[in-house]
Structure formats: C-alpha cells, structure tokens
Image (cartoon, rainbow, N blue to C red):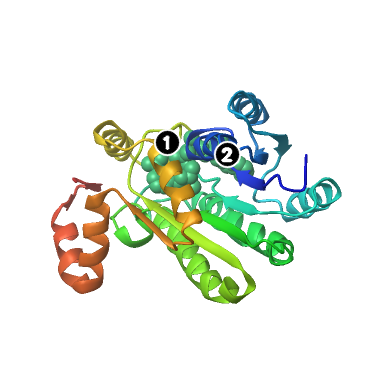
C-alpha cells in the first residue's frame, strides 16, 4: 500500500449498507478494514472489494466490546500510516411499545446502535485528527432519528443519539480538518430485519412493507454518503419524502406528532 492510498474502517461491513459503502470506496481504490461480527460476510465483502479495485482486510469486531475497539486501533496503527475515514454503520433493529419492549432488548439496541458510534469515535478521533490531509467520519443514523414513529422508541433513541453525536462532532472537529456526515435514510432493503427483535408479528410486517415499497437501495445510500463526504456535507436525509418530514417536524412538531398518533392503532403504526 502506497502512502497515497486512502484507508477506511467500516463497521457492519459484512452486509447491506456497510457492504455497499465498501464497494463504493473500492471503485476509488481505497484500502478498507471490513469490521463485523459476521466474519464470513465480511470475507465476501473483501472479495467484492478486490474485484472492484480496492483492497483491505477482515476484522472480527463486536462493536459493543470497547477492548476490541482498542485492539483494532493498535493493530491498524501498526499497519497503516494514517486513517482517512471511519464509518460507524453496524446496527440492529426492532419494535415494540414502551412498557412491552423487553428491557434486555433496549440494552441490546443501545449497545449496538449507539455505543458503536461512541466507542468508534472515542477510539479513532485522535488518530483522524493527526491526518495531515484531513479525514472524515460517516455515522449511520436513520430517518428514525427524527421520525418519532410509535413502537420504535428503542431504535429512535439510538438513532437520535447518533444524530446528536454527529452534530456535536461536526462543530468540534471542523477546525481540526475532520469532516462529519450523518446518514438519515428511510427504509431500503437489506438483511436488517433478519436479526430484528419485534414484540408483535404485525410490527415485523410493517418493517417488511417498508422494505417492499422502498424505491431506494443500499447502493443509492452509499453513493449519497460518499458524495456528502466529498462535499464535507453534514446531513444526508433521503429520499425526498423523508426530507419533507424532516422540515415539517422542525416547523410544526406537535402537529406532525398528532398526525402520527392518529395513524397508530392496536399497537401498530399504519404508514
Ligand atoms: N435498511 C434500512 O431500511 C435502514 C434505514 C435506516 C438506517 N439503517 C441503518 O443502516 C445500518 C446498516 O444496516 P443494514 O440495513 O445494512 O442492515 P444489515 O443487517 O444488512 O447490516 C448490518 C450489519 O451490522 C452487523 N452487526 C450487527 N451487530 C453487530 C455487532 N455487535 N458488531 C459488529 N457488527 C454488527 C451485522 O452483522 C450486519 O453485517 C444500521 O445502522 C441501520 O440501523 C438501515
């Protein structure tokens, strides 16, 4: 690897959006540490990356394990001269009303979706700041970070946390030459629902409906993420319908929430 080669860490790189981001970076010749609990999936991503002009390595990483993050940093610091991009993307999903959604599932969701971003940024920000050519962080939140849909409190809380973390970092790191992008997409089809934890079957069906009716793909989101990085743009909210919701929620939050409440019946949000 030459000094000019750009380097990235991508969590959740074995599947879905993480894999799509790895492939998008590969087309520009990036060297990528593909991090996931799913080693076989990460190896498949590495094969795709190599086919598309990039290179990298598979890193078995459970994002909920702080010691594993520190060990990853120590390994990569020995191999790479600098770090250009950190993508905190690993995530899990689920739904259930507050009071019914099990507390152990709240812990699971917060551990994966929010601690992923906190551990990742805490561990790698100092190294990113050392990069003389500037560096970037992409955090995967979701339209759920501002959507406030009933039954999704645990997911919404973690994604709102990722949004707050990203906005704070944007201001904190701007003068240090490290850009921040936060991804807030609505539904797109991936393997996310396979491991998701729902209280009721109808809630899973709503998620499946969201996937089935989405016209957006993981590749669309990955393309938008890399374009935003290149422009040092903070927010990626997509598709257009999600952007409309984003502006309306800011303009008239209670009115929007009352409309959402009227679409919530028998423990299911009917969107
Ligand atoms: N698919 C959607 O509709 C959608 C919409 C908005 C945001 N997102 C977000 O996009 C991100 C990627 O999800 P996806 O849709 O590609 O789903 P996915 O299930 O296809 O990919 C998620 C990846 O994260 C990995 N992962 C899960 N727990 C982990 C852990 N503890 N440590 C390391 N890796 C772990 C999984 O093994 C998997 O490879 C998530 O943060 C998700 O919340 C997805």
- Distance (Cα) linking label 2 and label 1: 15 Å
Residues packed near mark 2 inside 10 Å, few (<14), some (14 to 19) or many (20 plus): few
Between residue 16 and residue 1, name the one nearer to us.
Answer: 1
Q: Is residue 168 above or below residue 5?
A: below
Residue at image point 51% right, 51% down: 109
Q: Quarter-wise, where is residue 90 in the image?
A: top right
Q: How many marks?
A: 2
Who's the residue at 53% across and 55% down the image? Answer: 138
Disc on the earlier residue, 2 or 1: 2
Residue 157 rendering spot, x and y as whole percentages: 43, 61
Label 2 near ligand 1 (CB < 8 Å): no
**Dividing the image into 4 quarters, which one contains the N terminus?**
top right
Identify the element where label 1 is drawn. Answer: helix
Which residue lies at the image location 20% right of the left edge and 66% below the top edge?
248
Where residue 28 is drawn, which disc sits there? 2
Q: Are marks 2 and 1 in contact (CB under 8 Å)?
A: no
Residue 22 position within the rendered picture, expressed as x and y whole percent measured from the top left: 57, 37
Q: Residue furthest right?
A: 78
Which residue is denoted by mark 1 in the rendering? 219
Residue 85 showing in the rendered view = yes
Up the image or down, 175 lies above or below 97; here it is: below
Disc 2 on helix, strand or loop? loop
Q: Is residue 81 left or right of residue 193?
A: right
Name which residue lies at 54% across and 48% down.
89
């Amino acid at each position: 690897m030459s000094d000019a080669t750009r380097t990235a860490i991508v969590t959740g790189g074995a599947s879905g959006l993480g894999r799509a981001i790895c492939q998008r970076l590969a087309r520009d010749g990036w060297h990528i540490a593909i991090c996931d609990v799913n080693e076989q999936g990460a190896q498949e991503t590495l094969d795709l990356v190599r086919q598309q002009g990039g290179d990298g390595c598979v890193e078995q990483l459970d994002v909920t394990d702080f010691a594993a993050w520190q060990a990853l940093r120590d390994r990569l610091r020995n191999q790479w001269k600098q770090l250009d991009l950190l993508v905190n993307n690993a995530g899990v999903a689920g739904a259930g009303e507050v009071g019914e959604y099990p507390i152990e599932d709240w812990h699971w969701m917060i551990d994966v979706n929010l601690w992923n971003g906190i551990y990742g940024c805490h561990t790698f920000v100092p190294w990113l700041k050392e990069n003389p050519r500037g560096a970037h962080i992409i955090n995967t939140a979701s339209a759920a970070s501002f959507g406030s849909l009933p039954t999704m409190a645990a997911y919404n809380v973690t994604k709102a946390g990722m949004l707050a973390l990203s906005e704070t970092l944007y201001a904190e790191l701007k003068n240090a030459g490290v850009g921040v992008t936060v991804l807030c997409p609505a539904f797109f089809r991936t393997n996310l629902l396979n491991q998701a934890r729902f209280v009721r079957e109808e809630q899973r069906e709503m998620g499946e409906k969201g996937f089935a009716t989405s016209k957006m793909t993981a590749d669309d989101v990955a393309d938008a993420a890399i374009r935003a990085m290149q422009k040092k743009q903070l927010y990626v909210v997509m598709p257009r319908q999600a952007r409309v919701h984003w502006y309306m929620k800011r303009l008239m939050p209670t009115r929007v929430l009352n409309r959402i409440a009227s679409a919530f019946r028998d423990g299911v949000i009917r969107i």
